[in-house]
Amino acid sequence: MKRRQEDFANLVNEVDIIMLDIEGTTTSISFVKEELFPYVRQEISNYLKETWDTQLTKDDVAALTRQVSEDARAGVEPLPTSHSPEVLIPALVATVAAMMDADSKVPALKALQGHMWHRAYLNGAITGHVYNDVVEALQQWKKAGKRLVVYSSGSVQAQKLLFSHSCHGDLLHYFSDHFDTSVGAKVEAGSYRTILQALHSPPPEKVLFITDLVKGELGGVTNLTFIVC
Ligand SMILES: [Mg+2]
């Protein structure tokens, strides 16, 4: 164990940039699986009722309606054409639940989830989980002059909300850059090349990516070190 800690410390000393995964790395998987996503299912009906007349929700509903009508060609039940919230909201709740059951990542769903979480973080209904030792590490790395960035499959907006409303207060200031899967999937080497380019790190880049990912095709990026925590 001590040897492992020393190896890790040596690795950190050698790099300029430390890139962190979130789910399973800075943050417990159960927070994401048992808090964030269930919150959407539990609160969506109330959320839609309370925000129905806002432009944000009108836009989200329009995007979901478009998505469902596209999916309808593949045999999915279309939403009712009624504009009445009494008719539309239960249908939207069922649609969103079905999309989440199917682990859909369509932008219309992600946008609505993001807006619900935004409100929940702001009103304190959700607090972002971050492990105690992660906060200590962030402090040490920052002090040592490391540049800290995040690469997570959660949207950049969701990442920023989590760290700015964490159980340890606002941690967002530790990070200079955030990346999500808009740069590509985490199992694709090209995603990491895109990130390295975006960071404008002078070559040879010395970047350490810390993740709980245990499988994937992460080869092909020779100037990036991966460590599985
Ligand atoms: Mg992870």
Image (tube, grey):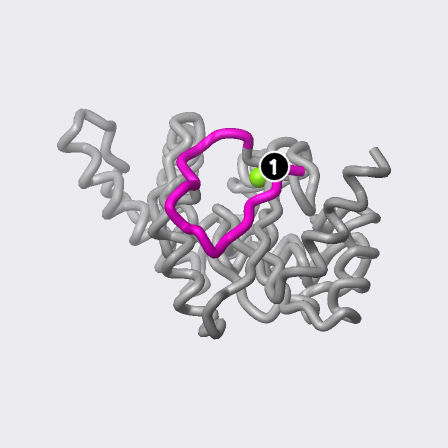
Indicate whether 93 appears above or below 65: above
Q: Residue at x 43, y 44 (%)?
A: 186
The amino acid sitting under disc 1 is: Asp
**Label 1: few (<14), some (14–19) or many (≥20) C-alpha neighbours in 10 Å:** some
The part of the image, by quadrant, that contains residue 162 is bottom right
Expressed as whole percent of the image width and height from the top left, the position of residue 8 reads 73, 47
Q: Residue furthest right?
A: 2
Magenta region: which residues? 214-229
Q: Residue at x 62, y 66 (%)?
A: 16
Q: Nearer the viewer, residue 27 or 92?
A: 27
Can residue 90 be seen here? The reply is no
Expressed as whole percent of the image width and height from the top left, the position of residue 52 reads 45, 55
Q: Nearer the viewer, residue 144 or 46?
A: 144
Expressed as whole percent of the image width and height from the top left, the position of residue 41 reads 54, 35
Indicate whether 35 appears above or below 208: above
Q: Residue at x 16, y 28 (%)?
A: 74
Q: Residue at x 47, y 56 (%)?
A: 223
Ligand 1 sits in quadrant: top right
Any atom of ligand 1 within 8 Å of the CB at mark 1?
yes
The part of the image, by quadrant, that contains residue 69 is top left
Kind of element beneath mark 1: loop
Q: Residue furthest left?
A: 73
Can residue 69 be seen here? The reply is yes
Is 106 placed left or right of 203 in the picture? Answer: left
The part of the image, by quadrant, that contains residue 175 is bottom right
Q: Check disc 1 and report the residue beneath it.
A: 212
| 66 drawn magenta | no
Expressed as whole percent of the image width and height from the top left, the position of residue 44 reads 52, 42
